Image (cartoon, helix red, strand yellow):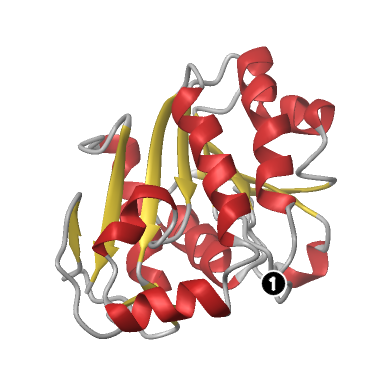
Amino acid sequence: MRLLLLGATGPTGLQLVGQALDQGHHVTALVRSPEKLPRVDGRLTVLVGDVADEQELASAAVGQDAVLSTMGTGRSLTSDIVSRTVDALVPAMHDAGVDRLIFLSAFGVNETYAQASLPQRFFYRTMLRKIYPDKGKADRKLLAADLDVTLVYPVTLTNRPFTGTYRVGDHFDFKGMPKISRADVAHFMLTQLTFPTWSRRTAILTN
């Protein structure tokens, strides 16, 4: 498939790029800092641009089979980049004629907060209290958009190796601070291209 990746230079995005190329996909990465993509591959096209720019997104999306986003706020705890990207992405995908979107959010955003354990809730209300509302705003816009969206809600992300034994569901009774590797999250996102079990649904991921 031909895939447009957003957030490709982040830790989860790098996993997604690597696994997508290993699976034989043709990847276009729209990034600000191309030097953060160390891999060179004939099936990888790197475009330098602004993920919150509708025209740049629409141009990058033309001819793609799907868009996958691992957009995050980096080290910022106050950024609104996710909602600004979604504001541009929805009309850009419509203009480009691309319907499929697999979008990485975070557990604890919107309705998933009700399933969080006490330690998780404390963390979301303190460290992430300024960025989660923006993520929630973005997710609500995506759910209301006329797109085939899978929203991915992983618990705490780690840099541990791929396991393939993670769990996916729409409801969990969590205790403590469960984790999942970024490699497993990237694997799940790519499986939804050919086995769209979670098409137009919200998927919670945990180990």
Q: Determine the secondary structure under disc 1.
A: loop
Q: Position of residue 207 (x, y in %)?
A: 22, 74
Q: Nearer the viewer, residue 148 or 107?
A: 107
Vertical placement of 46 versus 113: above or below? above
Q: Quadrant location of the N terminus? A: top left
Q: Nearer the viewer, residue 4 or 74?
A: 74
Asked whether, in this view, residue 30 is left or right of residue 165, the answer is: right
Tell me which residue sits at (30%, 79%) in the image.
118
Tell me which residue sits at (73%, 52%) in the image.
81
Q: Position of residue 148 (x, y in %)?
A: 40, 25
Tell me which residue sits at (82%, 35%) in the image.
53
Vertical placement of 27 versus 129: above or below? above
Q: Position of residue 23 (x, y in %)?
A: 38, 53
Q: Nearer the viewer, residue 160 or 40?
A: 160
Q: Say if residue 62 shows up in the picture.
A: no
Q: Say if residue 19 shows up in the picture.
A: yes
Asked whether, in this view, residue 90 is left or right of residue 180, the answer is: right
Q: Which residue is mark 1?
A: 77
Q: Quadrant of residue 178?
A: bottom left
Q: Position of residue 126 (x, y in %)?
A: 55, 79
Q: Quadrant of residue 8?
A: bottom right
Tell me which residue sits at (75%, 61%) in the image.
79
Vertical placement of 83 versus 80: above or below? above
Q: Quadrant of residue 36?
A: bottom right
Asked whether, in this view, residue 87 is left or right of residue 149, the answer is: right
Which three-letter amino acid code belongs to the residue tagged 1? Leu
